[in-house]
Structures are given as C-alpha cells and as structure tokens.
Image (cartoon, coloured by chain):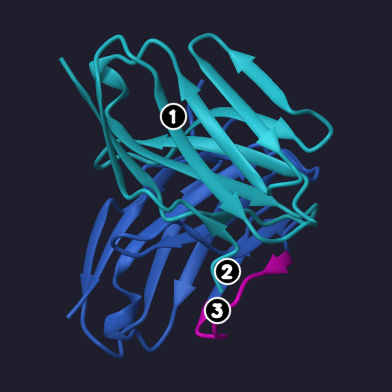
Amino acid sequence: DAGVTQSPTHLIKTRGQQVTLRCSPKSGHDTVSWYQQALGQGPQFIFQYYEEEERQRGNFPDRFSGHQFPNYSSELNVNALLLGDSALYLCASSSRGRGEKLFFGSGTQLSVL
Amino acid sequence: DQQVKQNSPSLSVQEGRISILNCDYTNSMFDYFLWYKKYPAEGPTFLISISSIKDKNEDGRFTVFLNKSAKHLSLHIVPSQPGDSAVYFCAASDGTYKYIFGTGTRLKVLA
C-alpha cells in the first residue's frame, strides 16, 4: 500500500521563477492538504483540495495556487518566488471528513536563491 | 499569533524513563488534537490523537492527556527508547479542515 508520494524531493530555483510540486495521496484517500514548514517552525496550512476544488485556504498570498486531478493527485504552484518561500513543502492526504488524521509525504525541499 | 505552543524546544531523557512533551493552546474552539513525530528528511508520522470529549487516550507506549480547562495537552512516552529520538509536533483543529501545528520539541533519548 503506497503512502503519500511527493516529487521532486529537492528543488533549487531563483527569485521570480515559478515552481510546481506534485503529490499523490495514500490509497483510499480523496483529500489533499499542503503545508509549508520553514526551518525551526511547525508546518503551516496552505490549502486543502477535495473534489477538485479548494475547500479551505490558509494565510498565504495568491502566488500560491493548486489543483487536484480526478485521480485525487494534486499540484502546488508558486509564482514569482521570493527568498522567503524557501521551505519544506509537505503534502498530506486524508479522508473527506473533518477531524481526520493526516498522512504526510516526505516533502519537497525548495531553495530559492 | 501562535495558537499552539510547544514551549520546550528540546528535551533529553534516559532510555527506559518517561518522556513528557507538553503543548498549550489558546483557541477554545479546538476540538481535536494530534501528535506527530518527525525524523530528519522524512515527513511527519502520526502517533496518537485525542478528541475534546476525552481527557486521555492510550496507544501502547504513548498516552496523550488533555486538560481542557488549562488548554493543555501532554504526550507521555513510557518507556522511552533511543528510536524515539525525533522532533515531536502537536497539532489542533477547530473543526475546520486545517490543523495548526506547534513549533515542535526535539526529544533525545540517551542510551
């Protein structure tokens, strides 16, 4: 049973560029959440996708956008990268309800130079 | 505004002893809490959860206690093992779809 898979594992970009991160949820899960974890901090909620729509969004600018596909996989896009976007980006999958525990992937380490 | 706080950045415990990791929260609407463990270069791994209708939940060596009046929860690990050395995060949900995480406590279990 495959868990949550994310790609790529590492990425280096320069300021102003755009990046796309990918996530496949755990088998049987239909909901994908994205979190940003800066160094020394806990994960911060970016947004959640369910039924191919953004269901809830955290306090992140519109430069952060996402998509969910019919097979439940998801992408996170970040435009106009800033140095402060350097972080570990975590994808978590769950079932549709509230209060469901999250299963995380290993993350994508993004470095913006 | 840090709604979930883990005030101890690090903790060292001897193997076989009890590890107690603490977490405080400010939002009385939080009704579901999770604990995660994270090793370097890996994603967080779910450990144990507790609903606000309970004050205790056990799973093997892990027990979580919830004190709603104090807005405090704690994770007890007994007995502690060297493989438990990791960063531990508590997370809380207010019934919406997001979880708010603390900043983590790094546990080191000494052999």
In the picture of the structure, the residue carrying the numbered disc 3 is: A60
Q: Is residue B48 left or right of residue B27?
A: left
Q: Position of residue A110 (x, y in %)?
A: 28, 65
| Label 3: chain letter | A
x 27%, y 28%: residue: B85
C-alpha distance separating marks 2 and 1: 38 Å
**Of label 2 and label 3, which has the lower sequence position?**
3
Residue where numbered disc 2 is placed: A66
Colour chain B appears in: cyan
The amino acid sitting under disc 1 is Ile
Categorize mark 3 by other alpha carbons within 10 Å: few (<14), some (14-19), many (20+): few
The blue-coloured chain is labelled: A
Q: Secondary structure at mark 1?
A: strand
The amino acid sitting under disc 3 is Phe
Eye-nearest disc, 1 or 3: 1
Magenta residue check for A60: yes
Residue on which disc 1 sits: B20
